[in-house]
Image (cartoon, rainbow, N blue to C red):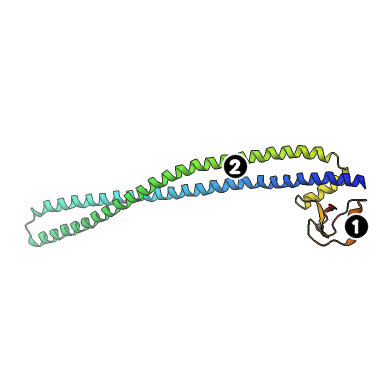
Amino acid sequence: MEKIQEQIDILIKLQELDAQLYQLAEEKVAKPTEKQALEEEFSQKKEGIKAKEDAWRSLQLKRKDYEMDLETKEKEIKKYQGQLYQIKNNKEYTSLQKQIEGLKADNAVLEDDILALMEKIDVAKTGLAGEKDNIAAEEKNLKQETAKIDQEIKEIETKISSLEKDRSQLSANVEKGLLSRYERILKAKRGLALVAIVGESCGGCNRVLPPQIINETRIKDEIITCDFCSRLLYWSG
Ligand SMILES: [Zn+2]
């Protein structure tokens, strides 16, 4: 009985360590995902800016197209106006004049379009400048956040290795068969292998234990397991 109690006392400490180790391992696994989420969020914002930049460039190209079109038509107008003086025929004169009027009407529309485009380009440019400032600040922020996460990972690793040292010292005092039984359950039950009886229930699965199991656990002739969840039981009362 004393020997069993001694083993249980060590296992209780071991279970405390293992609970911490499992918790830390989970935290460590979650950290890179946290980092990745931040990086993805940032790169999406960057993509958004790039798309707006592309839109701004294509507005500028459109403006250039319109201006070239305007210039071509103005040249045509000048050419036709020159021809007007050489025409003797009334009908030809009228037709050429109509063409000139048509071109001038086109150009008036083009000039309006160009003005509207210039306004759009200005608005886009101002918006982009603001977003670029923001993204620069966010990039700085991202670097700080990811560096913080890296630091947290390091701290977790330090804690883990220190706990593992304690663990190996402690587990050296557990009888080999019992230790491997405990470790098997620990793995299967994700970090919780040894539980106290709480009231009349298993502290692991919360199910009510048969009185016989409770009695056997209290007697401490051997280490008893819960029939429902297979965890090792101990009597703490
Ligand atoms: Zn149980």
At 90% from the left and 47% from the top, the residue drawn is: 4
Q: Residues within 10 Å of mark 2 (few under 14, many from 20)?
A: some
Which image quarter: residue 21? top right
What is the x, y in percent for residue 205? 78, 58
Task: State left or right for residue 28 relative to residue 167.
Answer: left
Q: Residue furthest left?
A: 88
Residue 192 sits above or below residue 94 on the image: above
Q: Number of labelled discs?
A: 2
Q: Residues within 10 Å of mark 1 (few under 14, many from 20)?
A: few
At 86% from the left and 42% from the top, the residue drawn is: 174
Find disc 1 in the rendering and name its residue. 215
- Ligand 1's image quarter is bottom right
Comparing labels 2 and 1, the label whose residue is closer to the camera: 1
Question: Residue 149: which numbered mark, if any?
Answer: 2
Task: State left or right for residue 100 relative to residue 158.
Answer: left
Which image quarter: residue 161? top right
Q: Amino acid at mark 1?
A: Asn
What is the x, y in percent for residue 163? 74, 39
Q: Earlier in the sequence, mark 2 or mark 1?
A: 2
What is the x, y in percent for residue 11? 83, 46
| Residue in front for this viewpoint, 8 or 140 | 8
Q: What SS does tag 2 mark?
A: helix
Residue 81 sits above or below residue 175 on the image: below
